[in-house]
Image (cartoon, rainbow, N blue to C red):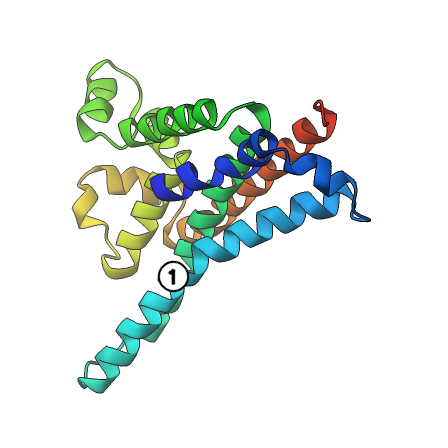
Amino acid sequence: PIFILITTVRSLAGDREAGVFEYVLGLPVSIGAWYAGRFLGRYTLAVAPVVAALLLAVVYGVARGVVVPWIELGFDIGLLLAMIFVFVGLGFFVSSMTRSVDTAQTIAFLLWLTLVLALDLVLLGALIRGRLPIEGVVAIAMLNPLQVFRTGSMLLFDPQLVLLGPTAFTVFDIFGRVGFMIWSFVYPLALGTLAAVGGWLVFRRGDLP
């Protein structure tokens, strides 16, 4: 995610600094089509090496006679694609709101630190000790796309979420196993789409050369 954020925020901000907009506006291509093309291109570049690496691992495993868990592998690839999508969307939103690459990368890094901080078990434990209801703590965690991906990945190979400890009971009470797997896909895709559309609205209303 941090690699995706840092590289994606350079897309619009970098084009603005390099003066690419002047060239683009001289072509018979709409701004919306150009924005969508940049988004899809960046998403493809981020997805390709991840999927290729997984496929190479599968080929190597099959060649060595390893039993491949195809269903879990398919879900895991889907979770990775959803996570990449949300961070590309967030990257475009940040990039559309900034004027320079340095500012965009700084905001992206701060966003990353905020999301990582929300993964901190010590912080979550402190919130619980501060008498915040555990349902509220879990809700905060489940709005973090990193935590959603992490928990969804655990759920594939740990159906009881033993690794999460007592928190797992609250997760199951709120979502259920099937419900959480659906949330693991729907939420990142919805958040990524919202961020991408928000970035487009900001970009369209901004000062284009």
Q: Nearer the viewer, residue 208 or 150?
A: 208
Q: Nearer the viewer, residue 135 or 204?
A: 204
Residues packed near mark 1 inside 10 Å, few (<14), some (14 to 19) or many (20 plus): few
Q: Nearer the viewer, residue 133 or 195?
A: 195
Q: Secondary structure at mark 1?
A: helix
On the picture, is 2 further left or further right than 196? left
On the picture, is 51 further left or further right than 128? right
Q: Which residue is mark 1?
A: 49
* Residue 57 is at least partly visible in this image: yes
Where is residue 86 shown, x and y percent of the image? 48, 43
Residue at 52%, 29% in the rendered image: 94
Where is residue 104 shown, x and y percent of the image? 47, 27
Q: Quadrant of residue 73?
A: bottom left
Q: Quadrant of residue 11?
A: top right
Where is residue 44 shown, x and y percent of the image? 51, 57
Q: Residue furthest top?
A: 130
Kindly identify the amino acid type of the residue bearing the numbered disc 1.
Pro
Where is residue 81 shown, x and y percent of the image? 45, 55
Q: Is residue 19 above or below residue 33?
A: above
Residue at 25%, 19% in the rendered image: 127
Residue at 43%, 41% in the rendered image: 7
